[in-house]
Structure formats: structure tokens, C-alpha cells
Image (cartoon, grey):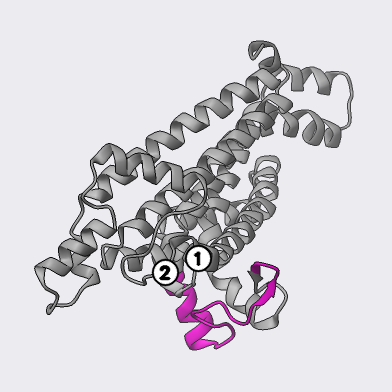
Amino acid sequence: MLAFIGRRLLQSVLVMLTVALIAFAMFRYVGDPIVSMVGQDTTEAQRAELRESLGLNDPFVVQYARFVSNAAQGNFGISYRQRQPVSDLIEQRLPATLELSFVSALMALAFGIPMGIYTALRRHGVLSRAFMALSLAGISLPTFLIGILLILVFSVQLRWLPSFGRGEVIAIGGWTTGLLTPSGLAALILPAITLALFQMTLIMRLVRAEMLEILRADFIKFARARGLPQRLINFRHALKNTLVPVITITGLQLGSIIAFAIITETVFQWPGMGLLFIQAISTVDIPVMAAYLVLTAFFFVLINLIVDILYVVVDPRLRVQSK
């Protein structure tokens, strides 16, 4: 098990170095950050001096090595536009993104798995058909359209929930949360539903398909022939084997929640990393853009590492293969 984790950690480091190289190389040559930082009255000498002070004249390899070394320490340089350390901007925005992603992931799992189980066991019921129709809408409609529709109904027409912002937040150490305030909870509902709906319907359909396949397996037929209670067959034998492939897909989808929160944050003006990234694109703020991509890749790699470990724990056959 330790050897397996060690190999996965080594692979994760290689992936992060590759992502850092791609992000740095891509944004190193996108636009000229000096143009976004200075005014029209700035002389060429002042521009050259600023370029030198930022290290933009150094060779590519030197800049990349400096970027990786600093990023490993949580230092992503100075924002070209806001003239603040990027780490400070991330520290201000990251709690909002993680809080939104965490709540959305919990909603997707809390509703998606039970709905998938129900539609598999009661696939001809009226409620199952309603769930399948809802899942079709959740997969078909784009995220930004779902957000706009929710704003139109619950914010504009009914005026039950706020349409933008994070509400009142409370600082706990270096972390800010809106989960402990009424306005923070109210502001979280619509963006969390918007972000969770696609993932929830995908998890529901996956659980349903896998469970239907497992219920047709020979060992389930043998369990029925032995006279085991149907509840025991469904929730101990069938569900346990259903979770093996579900864990992998669900882990990838939870990682994509963080990555695709950028759309939801833009629609609801949620003050998170996604909105910061959109603002950085409009001003060619290279350090912020590179930091966002590296952090997103880090969360993906971390979640995949956890999923790989859980996969080995759930499926004993992989323990033998990993030795």
C-alpha cells in the first residue's frame, strides 16, 4: 500500500511540473503585461526598467525554474494589475470557491446517489420517471443558463434569495465563511444548486446504470436463490459493488466542480477564484492566471490521488495488483 501511494505521489509531482510548464509557457507569451500596468505617458526607459525589475528579460528556463520554486512555497509573484501579492489575492478568494465547491459536492452526492439507487430499484415508478426527466434537463442545459433561470425565478420574480454576492461572512482565523450567517447561507443556495445540478444528474445516472448491471449479475441471482432478504441483497451486495466504478467517476467530477466553478461564480458574481481568473484574463494578469491553473491542477491531482487510494480500499483485487 505504501509503495502504491509512493508511486502515485511521484506521478502527481510529474503531472504538476508538466501543468506548471504548460501554464507558464502559454501565458508567458500572451500579450504584454507592461501595457496593462503603465499609462500612456510612461516612457520607454521606464517600461524597460519595469520589465527588468519583474524579471521578464530573463531566459525562459530561468523564469520557469523561479516560477516553480516560488509556487512550491505558495508565492506566485505580484499581480500586474492590482499590485498585490498573488498569494494574498488567492487567500482572500480561495475560501469562497472551496466553500461553494464543497457544498455543491455534498449536494450532488447527497441527492445523486439515493436518486440513482431509487431509479434502479423502482425504475418503472412515476417518481423514477420524474427523476430521469430532471436528470435529462440537468445534463442538457448549460450551467450559465440554469443560473440565469434560477435568478429569474427566485431572485427577480419571487425575491426569496439574493442574485449576487456572498452575503455576510465571518472570519475564523485566516478563513472566511458564510455558512454561519443567514445572509451567507441565503446567498449560497442558488450558486450551489447551479453548480451541483449537472454533477448530481451525472452521478444519479451512473449509479443507476451500474446498479442495474450489478443486479443482473450471477452472484446476485445466487444470493436470491439462497433466500437472502432483498434489502440485504440491494444495499450490501449490489450497492457495494456499484460504488467501485462510481468512486472513480465521482472523484473526477468533484474535481471538475472546482474547475468549472468559474462559470457559476461569473453568473452570480461570487467573489471566488473563478471570478478573479476572469478579471485577470481581461487585464492580461499573467501571475494570477498561471496561479489559478496551477491551483486547479493541484486540486485535480489531489482528488485523483485520494480516489486511487479509495479504489484500492474498496476493491481488494487491486491490492494484489499494486504489490
Amino acid marked by disc 2: Gln
Residue designated by label 1 = 88
Callout 1: helix, strand or loop?
helix
Callout 2: helix, strand or loop?
loop
The residue nearer to you, when weighing 252 against 230, is 252
Quote the CA–CA distance across marks 1 and 2.
7 Å
| Residue drawn at x 27%, y 67% as measured from the top left | 282
Q: Is residue 240 left or right of residue 282?
A: right
Amino acid marked by disc 1: Asp
Q: Position of residue 224 (x, y in %)?
A: 82, 23
> What number is the disc on residue 127?
none
Q: Position of residue 24 (x, y in %)?
A: 31, 45
Look at the image and give the residue range highlighted in magenta: 146-175
Vertical position of residue 35 compared to residue 64: above or below:
below
**Residue 78 appears in which quarter of the rendering?**
bottom left
| Residue drawn at x 82%, y 21% as measured from the top left | 223
**Residue 305 appears in which quarter of the rendering?**
top right
Vertical position of residue 323 compared to residue 122: above or below:
above
| Residue drawn at x 41%, y 59% as measured from the top left | 141
Q: Position of residue 147 (x, y in %)?
A: 45, 70
